[in-house]
């Protein structure tokens, strides 16, 4: 069923009444934007539920969390002012702050000029509530609550608050809702649900459902809300649900007698508390019968409302009968449609918990980084551009790229930390450097991509130390591309072979990321969730790159070299020697690394790397073996085991005459970009120390797109 | 939370509002013997209900012997049903005239309102009824922290029409009004009241004092609580019942509708309620009572008010059911979970936890009849079905409708109907 367009609904009517110019802008934009203030567990959870219902959540407000996001994509601002600068059309706010801080938050939102505010917070001190009300009156704000479950506009599909999805609008045609119905206004949340449920079960639509709030003083009362609802042309009847305590029912009744012109439509009242004992508070702070007072009792309210000509009932059935008779038997929809809707809700399987990542989409035979296929990125983009894409979601413009490059060069010009390396995995050596490097630790991370660039430069320096090629970094021309640095530090040669340099960079780009599930990414994300510092979290990820994870390239290089040297030594063809060596591996129960993949049957990085190796003129015997090894393996073992990216990288590294361990160095170096991106994503989009189930992650980033040019 | 008179006076004294000399608060008549007192003094029963004077709870005595015999009587008295356990011994104040000053929030406008009357010492509601012209109400729409001077002046001029004070006393009176307002705001009060404020030759003195604090603000009134020697919220007028105390310790609101140890009438069905939501908690009492009257000859008695609070944890839900099943008078429990903020899943897990625990320990199980709809219903339904298969015996007295084919009023009716049938009762 189609919902009605926002400008035909009651919420728009209210906004227009309070802020006509804002209403004009909303009409143009075609949507009513809302903001969520207070992003604790409750606010965050219900932001998701509101969004699921159809509400446009444009932003969130949480002091100190500006620049981060909720629900992965909704931007968070430190305060309303900054938020409205970016999103001037926001018209509705829901406030979820704790009662001890709700006042300042509410005042800030009111003073920002937002016309409709729903204050969810329960138990705000009355003195604070009065300050909030004084300000709301001054700014002509429609303030609903505190201690309200919120408001819901079923025809438009807009919910602000935490009401469940149980309300049903008019059906104007077989496929679209209409705006007409009964407006339900209640002091209690649960009564709202039960009243709407009763009405729906009799085919009576609700065009708006408003929770007044249960605390001792609230921003709006029946006196404000009943005439407002009646002013909206599509409201047929107003149902109010009152309860013992306070005097808003009496005040409404009195006003109806004094100003009948404000009340052109029928009102039905359901009252609760006929059996309430004196002197005991019934849950709501406001719901208490005070001995000796002439207002606030069930009887005083009933008497006053009846005097004003309002039908007063005290049960669900009473309500159904009274509303039916006021409507003269009119119904708004087939009752079965309401039951069907409810049934689909409760019969649908429990929603699987998911969390989102915007970085990399991992599908069989397809890797997509922020929308761009990785195979295309490897072909067309350099490492720094790719790193920027990972961290920022977009490729950098030329100036930014140049700035990043300069940051890298600056970083690598500073001496590395003074440490000793033992006979150890290269990942451990790099992790040691990351953890002890004061320059890296002190580099600010306000701009994540800059921090990652600085880290890239530092890692070049570490590699120089570890591979004993540091002397090649001494006189690097600052205007040269990043690939030159890479070439020098990896090969130990000062004269750069452009094509080889580009090949090495492509290998790095091919290794940048594989989503959130690789152990290295998990290690970094877990550290990030505890808000460990950047270099610690990245070092954690790097430390998890071992012979088991990320070490296949080096072993594959060894394997390819064996094949080639056996062919030469025994003067047999490459395929013969390969077959022999595979047989030997199999008989000894050894794994052939660089083959097979848990997700890809045709690794999306394979062909592009082979192509680049050909173009660079580095493809030789090892690459040739890598192209045939799968079919030879099948001849030996009878099963498909496709070559993977590690295999290709191992072959290229071997053909370039580099040490097999270089394959792993390149993998780690490239992967640091992905780890950086995961670190910053975790710290800016997720609550700290959350429970992480990595298999629940889904890609919520940009749609697939092409690199042009 | 309402303060005792002596506590309120301590607060007033600290704020510079003149109060009579307070000798002590005593808990037995013999304590008066060792006290050094300048008679006459007032003996005031410390109970948290109004109208103590009229009920004989306040006496003036002019000597020790008289004091002792009056005290002996007082400690045996009940004032509106509440026993006198403490008596304030206080200097008796004499004056030419008396007035009333009260500050509260107007429940209709939510503005603070200062109410003054030159008829002090009598019931202000009565004055409002019989002599409304003797009352002046001034609303303070800005929620000012301090009372504007001009307003204090206006209020005093009104009082002075009857009181005819000299300029010095007039100034002192304005000072008391301002200080009372400041007390009201500073300590987050719902009511600050002096009745009577006696005008002595030395100036006005607060002969009585009433302060009701805003419970929602107690968290930031530590300093005040420390002065009063209490650690947190204290019960108001009445002692909580046994059930209410259990509920309090588990952090959910609960009110007994029947007196403690009420006699059970044999032909009546006693219904406990676990309704979810404070408002529906109140309405469901009415529903049960109405349905009982309409269909079951008025033989159905609702027993309690309860509210789980928003988003209760499973443990609390389970305790709510345990509490009612431990309450011998209850025959049937009606429950409803309309999950908005609260989760149906947590609700059903809590209920099933309670049913299983009772089954295992052989404790009394009361039939539970109810319905759940709303947030997390699919997972709640899945859990319920699994639980029914796993432990059918433990859950056989539990009948929970999933979804809303039936409105709650009809679920209540069905529940009562089945309880009547199982007893062989006719409607």
Image (cartoon, rainbow, N blue to C red):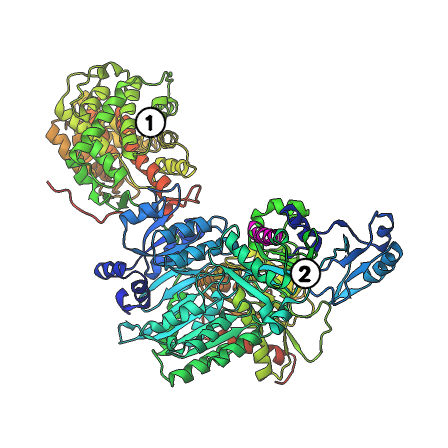
Residue in the picture at 52% in, 67% down? B279
Confirm whether circles 1 and 2 share one chain. no
How far apart marks 1 and 2 lie (CA) works out to 74 Å
Quarter of the image that includes the N terminus of chain A: bottom left
In front of the other: A253 or A608: A253
Instruction: In the rendered view, tell whether residue A384 sits above or below residue A517.
Output: above
The residue range painted magenta reads: B171-188
Number of labels in the image equals 2
- Residue A53 position within the rendered picture, expressed as x and y whole percent measured from the top left: 35, 61
* Horizontal side, residue A2 vs residue B282: left or right: left
Q: Position of residue A90 (x, y in %)?
A: 30, 55
Give the chain of mark 2.
B
Q: Quadrant of the C terminus of chain A?
A: top left
Residue A176 located left or right of residue B316: left
Tag 1–tag 2 contact (CB < 8 Å): no
Q: Residues within 10 Å of mark 1 (few under 14, many from 20)?
A: few
From the viewer's perspective, tell me whether residue A467 is left or right of residue B258.
left
Residue in the foreground of this view, choosing between A181 and A469: A181
Residue A578 visible? The answer is no
Which residue was labeled with disc 2? Answer: B98
- Residue A591 in magenta? no
Numbered label attached to residue A443: 1
Image location (x, y in percent) of residue A366: 23, 45
């Amino acid at each position: 069923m189609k919902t009605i367009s926002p400008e035909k609904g009651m919420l728009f009517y209210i906004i227009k009444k309070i802020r006509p110019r804002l209403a004009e802008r909303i009409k143009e934009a075609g949507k009513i934007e809302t903001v969520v203030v207070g992003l604790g567990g409750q606010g965050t959870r219900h932001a998701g539920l509101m969004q699921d219902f159809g509400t446009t959540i444009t932003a969130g407000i949480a002091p100190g969390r500006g620049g981060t996001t909720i629900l992965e994509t909704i931007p968070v601002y430190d305060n309303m002012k900054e938020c409205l600068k970016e999103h001037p059309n926001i018209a509705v706010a829901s406030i979820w702050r704790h009662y001890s801080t709700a006042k300042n938050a509410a005042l800030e939102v009111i003073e920002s000029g937002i016309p409709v505010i729903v204050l969810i917070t329960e138990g705000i001190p009355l003195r604070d509530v009065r300050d909030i009300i004084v300000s709301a009156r001054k700014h002509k704000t429609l303030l609903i609550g505190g201690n309200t479950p919120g408001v819901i506009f079923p025809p438009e599909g807009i919910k602000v608050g935490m009401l469940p999805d149980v309300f049903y609008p008019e059906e104007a045609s077989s496929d679209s809702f209409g705006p007409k119905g009964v407006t339900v206004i209640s002091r209690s949340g649960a009564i709202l649900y039960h009243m709407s449920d009763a009405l729906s079960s009799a085919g009576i639509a609700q065009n708006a459902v408003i929770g007044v709030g249960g605390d001792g003083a609230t921003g709006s009362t029946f006196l404000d809300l009943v005439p407002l609802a009646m002013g909206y042309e599509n409201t047929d009847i107003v149902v109010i649900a009152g309860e013992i305590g306070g005097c808003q029912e009496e005040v409404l009744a009195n006003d109806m007698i004094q100003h009948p012109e404000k009340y052109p439509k029928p009102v039905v009242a359901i009252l609760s508390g006929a059996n309430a004992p004196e002197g005991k508070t019934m849950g709501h702070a406001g719901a208490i019968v005070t001995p000796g007072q002439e207002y606030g009792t069930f009887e005083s309210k009933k008497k006053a409302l009846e005097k004003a000509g309002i039908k007063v009932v005290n049960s669900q059935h009473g309500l159904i009968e009274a509303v039916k008779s006021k409507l003269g038997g009119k119904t708004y929809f087939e009752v079965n449609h309401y039951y069907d809707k409810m049934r689909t809700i409760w019969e649908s399987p429990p929603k699987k918990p998911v969390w989102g990542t915007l970085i990399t989409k991992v599908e069989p035979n397809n890797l997509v980084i922020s929308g761009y296929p990785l195979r295309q990125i490897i072909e067309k983009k350099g490492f720094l551009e790719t790193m920027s894409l990972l961290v920022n979601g977009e490729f950098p413009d030329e100036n930014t790229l140049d700035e990043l490059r300069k940051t890298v060069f600056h970083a690598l010009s500073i001496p590395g930390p003074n440490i000793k390396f033992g006979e150890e995995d290269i990942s451990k050596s790099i992790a040691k450097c990351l953890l002890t490097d004061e320059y890296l630790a002190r580099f600010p991370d306000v701009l994540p991509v800059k921090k990652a660039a600085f880290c890239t430069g530092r890692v070049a320096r570490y590699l120089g130390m570890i591979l004993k090629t540091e002397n090649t970094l001494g006189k690097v021309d600052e205007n040269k591309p990043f690939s030159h640095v890479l070439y020098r530090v990896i090969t130990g040669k000062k004269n750069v072979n452009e094509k080889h340099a580009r090949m090495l960079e492509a290998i790095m780009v091919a290794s940048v990321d594989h989503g959130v599930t690789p152990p290295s990414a998990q290690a970094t994300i877990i550290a990030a969730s505890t808000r460990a510092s950047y270099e610690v979290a990245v070092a954690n990820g790097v430390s998890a790159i071992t012979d088991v994870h990320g070490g296949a390239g080096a072993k594959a290089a060894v394997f390819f070299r064996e094949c080639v040297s056996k062919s030469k030594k025994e003067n047999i063809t490459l395929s013969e020697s390969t077959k022999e060596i595979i047989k030997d591996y199999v008989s000894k129960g050894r794994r052939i690394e660089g083959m097979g993949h848990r997700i890809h049957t045709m690794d999306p990085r394979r062909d592009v790397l082979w192509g680049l190796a050909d173009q660079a003129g580095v493809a030789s015997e090892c690459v040739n073996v890598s192209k045939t090894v799968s079919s030879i393996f099948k001849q030996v073992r009878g099963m498909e085991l496709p070559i993977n990216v590690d295999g290709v990288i191992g072959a290229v590294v071997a053909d370039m005459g580099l040490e097999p361990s270089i394959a792993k160095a390149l993998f780690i170096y490239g992967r640091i970009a992905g780890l950086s991106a995961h670190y910053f994503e975790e710290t800016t989009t997720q609550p700290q120390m959350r429970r992480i189930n990595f298999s629940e992650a889904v890609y919520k980033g940009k749609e697939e797109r092409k690199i042009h040019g | 939370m309402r303060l005792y008179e002596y506590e309120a006076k301590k607060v007033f004294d600290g704020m510079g509002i003149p109060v009579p000399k307070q000798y002590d608060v005593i808990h037995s008549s013999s304590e008066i013997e060792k006290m050094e007192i300048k008679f006459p003094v007032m003996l005031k029963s410390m109970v948290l209900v109004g109208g103590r004077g009229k009920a004989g709870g306040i006496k003036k005595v002019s000597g020790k012997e008289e004091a002792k015999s009056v005290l002996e009587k007082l400690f045996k008295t009940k004032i509106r049903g509440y026993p006198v356990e403490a008596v304030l011994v206080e200097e008796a104040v004499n004056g030419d005239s008396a007035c009333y000053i009260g500050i509260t929030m107007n429940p209709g406008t939510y503005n603070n309102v200062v109410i003054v009357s030159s008829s002090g010492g009598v019931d202000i509601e009565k004055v409002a009824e019989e002599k409304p012209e003797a009352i002046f109400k001034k609303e303070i729409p800005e929620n000012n922290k301090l009372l504007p001077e001009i307003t204090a002046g206006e209020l005093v001029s009104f009082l002075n029409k009857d009181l005819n004070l000299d300029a010095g006393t007039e100034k002192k009176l304005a000072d008391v009004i301002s200080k009372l307002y400041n007390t009201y705001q500073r300590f987050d009060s719902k009511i600050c009241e002096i009745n009577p404020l006696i005008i002595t030759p030395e100036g006005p003195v607060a002969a009585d004092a009433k302060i009701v604090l805003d419970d929602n603000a107690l968290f930031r009134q530590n300093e005040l609580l420390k002065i009063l020697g209490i650690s947190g919220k204290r019960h108001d007028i009445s002692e909580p019942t046994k059930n209410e105390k259990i509920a309090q310790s588990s952090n959910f609101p609960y009110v007994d509708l029947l007196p403690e140890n009420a006699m059970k009438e044999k032909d009546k069905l006693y219904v406990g309620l676990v309704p979810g939501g404070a408002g529906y908690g109140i309405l469901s009492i009415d529903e049960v009572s109405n349905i009982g009257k309409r269909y079951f000859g008025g033989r159905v008695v609702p027993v309690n008010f309860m509210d789980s609070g928003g988003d209760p944890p499973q443990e609390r839900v389970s305790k709510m059911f345990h509490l009612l099943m431990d309450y011998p008078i209850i025959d049937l429990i009606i429950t409803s979970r309309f999950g908005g903020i609260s989760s149906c899943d947590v609700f059903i897990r809590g209920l099933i936890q309670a049913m299983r625990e009772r089954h295992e320990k052989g404790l009394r199980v009361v039939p539970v009849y109810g319905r759940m709809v709303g947030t997390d219903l699919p997972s709640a339904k899945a859990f319920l079905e699994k639980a029914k298969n796993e432990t059918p015996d433990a859950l056989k007295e539990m009948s929970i409708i999933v979804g809303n084919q039936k409105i709650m009023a009809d679920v209540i009716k069905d529940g009562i109907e089945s309880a009547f049938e199982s007893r062989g009762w006719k409607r």
